[in-house]
Image: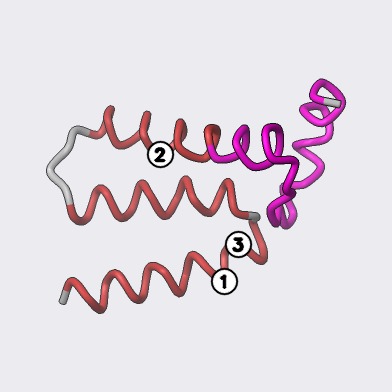
Amino acid sequence: KYVFVTAGSLIVLVFAIGFLGIYFSLVFFLAFYLRYFSDKSKLFISIFSIITPVLTFLFFEWLLQIPLPQGVSEPLFYPVYDFMY
């Protein structure tokens, strides 16, 4: 059961990255995965699901300057890019 849920959610994540972009897809994936497999509070899951993509963005886009796929959410990042560069 756990293997199928994990494999299925990862497959959905990969397809969602192409449409939504990695950062928003990661928020939904982490929220689902933590809610399904852990007994953490909803507040912890919400904070963790938002902070992790933000740190991933800062690490790859700002520190390493490696762009990750952003899908349809790319225009939302233009103000951030103007600020960063």
- Which circle's residue, 3 or 2, is located before the other in the chain? 3
Q: Which residues are magenta?
A: 56-84
Name the secondary structure under disc 3: helix
Q: Which part of the image, by quadrant, shows the C terminus?
A: top right
Name the secondary structure under disc 2: helix
How would you rate the neighbour count of disc 2 (Cα within 10 Å): few for under 14, some for 14-19, many for 20 or more? many
Measure the C-alpha gap from mark 1 to mark 3.
5 Å
Q: Amino acid at mark 2?
A: Ser
Q: Which part of the image, by quadrant, shows the N terminus?
A: bottom left
Measure the C-alpha gap from mark 3 to mark 2.
16 Å
Q: Which residue is mark 2?
A: 49
Which residue extends farthest left?
Answer: 39
Q: Which residue is mark 1?
A: 15
Q: Which residue is mark 3?
A: 17
Q: Amino acid at mark 1?
A: Phe
List x then y, in percent, for residue 11. Answer: 45, 74
**In the picture shown, does residue 81 fall above or below 56?**
above
Q: Main secondary structure of the magenta part?
A: helix
Measure the C-alpha gap from mark 2 to mark 1.
19 Å
